[in-house]
Image (cartoon, rainbow, N blue to C red):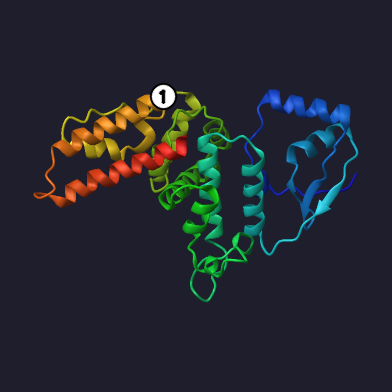
Amino acid sequence: MQEIIIDEEFKKLLPELDKETYAWLEESLLEYGCQNPLVLWNGILIDGHNRYEIIKRHDLPFRTISMEFDSREHVIIWIISTQVARRNLTPLQLSHFRGLHYNTDKLIIKNDGGKNQHSELWDQNDPKARNKTTAQRLAEQYNVSQMTIKRDANVSNAIMAIGEVSSEAKRKILAGGGNISRTRLQELATAAETDIIETIDRILEGTHERRRVRNSGNAKKSESAYNDDSENYEQLSLENFIIKITDDFNSGIRNLSLGEDTSKSKTVLRSFIKMLEELYDRI
């Protein structure tokens, strides 16, 4: 059997298959064989990790194809793009991949204009594409706002940091079993190591709880509720989600006067826009 190199960093990028899906894949490979070739880069497996694991166990025949990339960062971006295109990802998994894409793309060498570049994302028919920031390009690619991409970067940073300490906690989070919101993950991106470890312990123990929804009876409470982002709304139906953020916005704006305190009005308006972006991502 051809010797294939397994790179743990590449392998850890992929969400683990649940037992039912893995069993279905194994059954399919045993009955029909490996129809699609495994993809290699410099002898390293970059696509087909689950298939290769089953193939080795049962000594099944397989084919490979090789691809060329300029760097490991380009490989990671290709893996991310392939997974996003292929899989039915959860909102949290998609946030993680978008953020990881952003963080990885930022590592690629800059051009003379100081913009981060990734040749595969340039539109050769659009000369302005080279001058777009990473956030602009990825926002267009994933059809979300630039702020969503940047928030996703923090989500991904937190998930990767958690994975460095506990691969099981990372697996639970990406599988939707960690009972942790994207807002909390954004906070953990800049949290102390002790805070991350405590959170991991609670996730593994099954005792991690989301924060309760805050009432917004005045402007100060309303601003806090908006700053909690989607955390307070994730378990609501779409209709109730819209009603909730609209009520919070109306409650906050009634307590403000545009003429008296423009900064507070802008804060409430910006928070409302932020919540609408989260709603857009959720649909």
Indicate the quadrant containing the N terminus: top left, top right, bottom left or bottom right: top right
Task: Name the foreground residue: 248 vs 191.
Answer: 248
Task: Name the foreground residue: 126 vs 13.
Answer: 126
Q: Quadrant of residue 11?
A: top right
Instruction: Identify the amino acid type marked 1.
Output: Ser
Residue that sits furthest to the front in the current view: 125
118 to the left or right of 145:
right
Question: Image point 49% across, 29% down: which residue?
Answer: 178
Secondary structure, mark 1, is loop
Residue 14: give x, y in percent of width and height.
64, 41
Q: Which residue corresponds to mark 1?
A: 237
Residue that sits furthest to the bottom in the current view: 112
Characterize the local packing of mark 1: few (<14), some (14-19) or many (20 or more) Cα atoms within 10 angstroms. few
Residue 131: give x, y in percent of width and height.
50, 68
Question: Image point 83% across, 52% down: which residue?
Answer: 65
Residue 7's place in the image compared with 252, above or below, is below
Q: Quadrant of residue 219?
A: top left
Residue that sits furthest to the left in the current view: 260
Residue 130's place in the image compared with 80, above or below, is below
Residue 271: give x, y in percent of width and height.
29, 43
229 to the left or right of 178:
left
Q: Quadrant of residue 125?
A: bottom right
Residue 12 can be seen, yes or no: no
Residue 91: give x, y in percent of width and height.
51, 36
Residue 107's place in the image compared with 237, above or below, is below
